[in-house]
Each structure stands twice: as C-alpha cells, then as structure tokens.
Amino acid sequence: MAYERYLMKNVGLPNSRSIETYKAGGGYQGAAKALKMKPDEIVDLVKRANLRGRGGAGFPAGVKWSFLPPNREITYLCVNADESEPPTFSNRVLMENDPHMLLEGILIAGYATGTTIAYLYMRGEFTELFHIMQKAIDEAYAAGYLGKDILGSGYSLDCYIHRGAGAYVCGEETGLIESLEGKRGWPRIKPPFPAIEGAFRKPTVVNNVETLACLPHILTRGLDWWLSLGTQNSWGTKMYCVSGPVNRPGCYEGPLGITCRELIYGEDFGNGMRAGKKVKAVFPGGLSMGVLRGDMFPKNPADEVDPDADYDELDCKLDFDDPRRYGLMGLGTAALVVVPEDADIRAVTANVAHFFALESCGQCTQCREGTMWMYKMAQRIRDGAGRSFDLDVLAEVTENMGMMPGLSICGLSDGAAWPIRMLVQKFRAEFERHIGAQAPEAVARRIREINPAAYELPIAAGAR
Amino acid sequence: MSWRVVDRTKAPEDLGPGLSEAVKAKIRTFFDRYPTKRAAMLPALHIAQDAIGYVSLQAMHDIAELLEVSPAAVLDVATFYTHFWMHPKGDKVIVVCRSLSCELVGGKTLLQHVKEKLGIDEHETTPDGKYSLMTEECLAQCDHGPCMLINEKLHKCVRPEDLDRILADPDNDKLDIPRSDLFDAPPEKVEQS
C-alpha cells in the first residue's frame, strides 16, 4: 500500500530543486510560522512530537535541544549530512531533490536553538550534491530566508557548507565537530556533551538531515498529524531505503513501523527479490544495527520472538523499539540491504568487517585492533581456512568492544561488533557447514602462508 | 589517504610544488566563516589538491603558515581523510564503491574489470597519467549499484560492458548542472612538477 509522501513530496517533480517550486508547494510556511513563535515553544513542540533522530542513534531532538545551557552567548548548529552508513542514501535523495526542505528545517532548528551559524557538514563524496546545496543556499540568501533579519523577525542565521573528505567516523557528532574544527575526525569523550561544549568549545547541536527535514512538516501540518503516523513512541514519517538484489531498489517513504517483509516484497516498495530468490539475511537499519534472518528459514510457529532460534524474522517492524526484540541494536537509519539465499555469508561478513576495519579512526585500542582482527579472521574464513574456534574468538572480540560496555570513546566499535556478532550467532550453522566442507589441511596451509614460523607452534594444533 | 614512504631528510626542492598567491588568497576567504583559522583546514586541503593535483609537503607547509598551525597538524589531517593524495595522481580518479549493497549486485566484478582494463591496482596511476584508481566505502547511491565516481561525476548501475564507453568518453567527469567554484583552485593552476 502506497503511503502519502511528505518528506519526499517534491521528489520527481520538474525543477524540484528551485526555490520557486518549493514555495509554490507551500514551502517556507513552516519557518514563517516558527519565527512568530517563541524559541522555547518550538523546543516544547518538538519534545511533545518526540521527534527522534533519524541519523542512527534515535535520540529525541527536542531533548537534545533542551540540554543547551540557558545563558549561553553563542550556539552553533551542525547539520550532519555525512551519510556514510552502508546502505543508506535517504539523505542524498532528500538533498538532491529538495534541498530547500532541509534549509527550512535548518532555519526552524536554528531559530529554536538560538543558532548564529549553521555548518552543513557534507561528506566529500557528495560531489554533485555540494553544488546543488550551495545553489539552494544562495537562492535562500537571495530570497531572505538566510542572512540578516529573516522575514523581518530580527533573527539572523548564516549557513556554510563544510565539505568532508572521506571518513565515516565524521558522521559521529563529536567526530563531525572535530573535523569541522580542522582536525582529524577523532570523536571526543562524552560528557561534556556537544550541547555544553561542542564546536569551538561552544554549545552546539548536531542534527541529521532527515530529522531537520521533518520540522517544517511538524509546524505546518501540526502535532496531531505527526502523532497519527507511526507507532507508540515512534511517531512520524520515515524515509526507508531498500537496496540489494530486489526488483525495485530505491528510497520510499512511509510511517514508522512498516515491516521488513513489506519493504522487501510490497509492490510499492521492493516488489520482491530478483529471480524469485529467497532472502537469507537483511540488515534493516544499516550495517551497524545488526542482521535479521530471512525467509529462507521457516516461519516461527509461536508468537514469542526468539532471536536464538533459526526462524524467519522478516516480520520485524521498523520503528525505534521493535528491532531490539530481535537482538538488533536499534532502528539505525532504516536502510535495508537484502542478502539473497545464494550469497556466501562468509563474503558478507568479510565485507562488513572490512568496512569497520578501515573506517575505525584508531583512537581506542579495542576498536582499532579489534576491527582489524575481526577483518583478518573474516577474510581467512571467507577464503576457506576457517576453524570453528574462530567463530568463538569473533564472538569474544565483539563482546570486548564498544561504547556501551564503556570500552571505547564512540559508538563505531559497537556498530562494528554488533553485525559481526549477530552474523556469527544467527548464521552459525552455515559457517560450520562451510568449515566442515574445507579440506583438512586448509587452515594449516593458510597459517603457514601467513607466517611460516607458525608451523611448529601450538596454534596450528587446533586446526587439525 | 594515499601515500608513499617519503624521506624527510631530502632537500627543500623535493617538497613538491607549493601554493601560489592566488590559491593562498582563496584559502584566506574561508577565514571569516569560522571563529578559528584552523577550521579552514579541510577547505584549504581541498583547494590545494585541486590546484596541484595532490597535497605536496610544500603545500602542507604553506597551509600551516596560513592557518597558523604546525605543519605536522596539516599532515595529521591530510593523512586521515581518504580523499587526499600525498603523491601525484592521474587527471581523473576513479572511485569504485566496495560496500555491501554494491557488492551484492556485482561491485567486485566491476572493480576487477576496471583493474584489468586500466592495468593498475588501487592507489596507482595509469602510465599515461589519465586515470588513478581507488575504492571507497558506500557512496550512498545504493539503489543504483554498482556505482563509481570519476572525479565529481557519479556513474550509476555500471556494468562491465559499460566500462569501455564510459572510459572512452572525454566528459566522463563533467557534471551537467551549474557548479559552484567555492572549493576549486583559482583559474591560474600550478604545473605539477
């Protein structure tokens, strides 16, 4: 069933990027309304709407804004357009087709938080998008929606684009702030939180592109409309990305709470798998959140969800709470990548491990060493020289990384550990099957290739 | 980041080309956007790489002087980000996506074909200096995989049979939308040494 598009309403319209098209469709009305309210009223409105961050962490935006100290002299707003989580592309679709919706959101958020300068941190690989956004910003300045005394309200806002240069960790809010300040994108320990001490040591708010794009809609269509979409505590509309070998990969909009099955098979979404294959696995929230088993597995006869049993898990609803029942870290970016039944789960694991090994910034020992260690093991397993013991070591490594156990500065290590742990846990049978099918001397041969001196060490003993 | 081991005891002439006055003036225009000069580091590196073709050691010294930081700080940042090259590269950089969505629809095959067709490996440049190759993580166009960037232009749904046509097209890195020259080097370019 196709849902009405709000965030994506201008996608596909001719000349959708221009400010004239945006205004003709009712654009900047939300900002006009907001500028007549008091900033505290807007923060309160966003809190009541429970607008949760769409960048991956799902932290309520209104609560984040309320952390700002009351008597601050200057505030910065950083727009997180460093969309690097595979396989997310919803921010790109939004910025490419409707840059002004983002700018209106920036204006509203800036006014609500008392921001003087908004930095739009855009990843370096968004080459074409930079030109599109810069043009939109120039149009907004010319039309008086940015700059001094916007719409006669007395509020002034400057917006600058700061281009990144290829680092996933700069999507982490403090990594973004460090990169903005002209340093390596090394995240900072929190506390102090950016709201207290952020960019240039001043109060800063970092919000995702989609979170900000929701603001004009909350203001124009109202709180009741927002609360009518979605599920309990996961209100609102969301952009879902579907990718992988489905018939219709793309970005689709709907209320929060759509199931994975609907997104993969629904004719308004993925419209089924190519060549009618079954689904082996799906990463519903981007790689970091973890993996669900697909319909290659039998359906669960009971109502209770048991992440340890090998059942089809595609009925997972994509809101902020349901994925946790299946063992996932959270909703993440609601971007699905579907792994078909004939894909090698070892290759998928190695690909995921490679991503995190290269993108780890290197500050925290567990993450720096752990991600590379997991990658090397995943490579060896993929190349047909794995041992059953390796799977246990992988599981152990994943339990000793992360911000949540208090061992790392940022959540990249959690994001690295979670999918690997879940892949090993949920697809153990397949890993064991591949390992069992290996030639008996495969591991010993590989170990000798890597390090000839290891031939005589006890480490090779477990391999035979 | 792409680098080769460099002998730092070499004489100053081997630090590579520096930044022209026009480039330095362009970098200075970023100072009033930020409360610190250091924050202009990424824009400065983008402009320097556009001017010279890569970020040479001399360029790092020049940026350090402009931004009033130590040259080590510039080296720190330049080597952290994957976009910056520490050694000369080709006129066009082909960036192939190697993340999961693209791999599931044929990204590895595409990369293999690109390597064979150009005869180079990652971070290498073709002998005629036209193309360099690197891989990058998710380029955020997963619904049109496998994708690759050639300089600024994103090529989507690239199949190995499309490669000949794409590589033969002299405008394969040109955008068809109006461009902002904010991060471009000013028109007078420094010759690569």
Image (cartoon, rainbow, N blue to C red):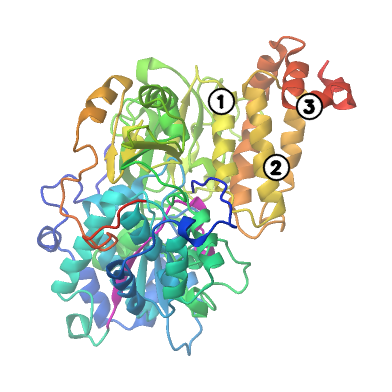
Q: Position of residue B157 (x, y in %)?
A: 30, 29
Marks 2 and 1, how far apart in space? 18 Å
C-beta proximity under 8 Å, tags 3 and 2: no
Question: Where is residue A257, by image quadrant?
Answer: top left
Given residues A232 and A160, the one toward you in this image is: A160
Chain of the residue that carries numbered disc 1 in the rendered image: A
Q: CA distance from mark 1 to mark 3?
A: 18 Å
Q: Residue A347 bears which disc, if any?
A: 1
Residue B161 shown left or right of residue B89 in the figure:
left
Q: Position of residue B127 (x, y in %)?
A: 37, 32
Closer to us: mark 2 or mark 1? 1
Residue A286 sits above or below residue B189 on the image: above
Q: Are marks 2 and 1 in contact (CB under 8 Å)?
A: no
Q: Position of residue A158 (x, y in %)?
A: 29, 76
Q: Within 10 Å of the Cα at label 2, are there few (<14), some (14-19), or many (20+) other Cα atoms?
A: many
Residue visible at 88% across and 26% down in the picture: A457
**Which residue is found at the position 69% from the left and 31% from the top?**
A377
Identify the image quadrant of residue A436: top right
Task: Name the residue that disc number 3 marks.
Answer: A389
Do we see residue A14 in this rendering?
yes
Where are the magenta residues, as a range? A156-175
Under circle 1, the secondary element is: helix
Residue A173 drawn in magenta:
yes
Q: Which residue is mark 2?
A: A398
Please, what secondary structure does the residue beneath circle 3 have? helix
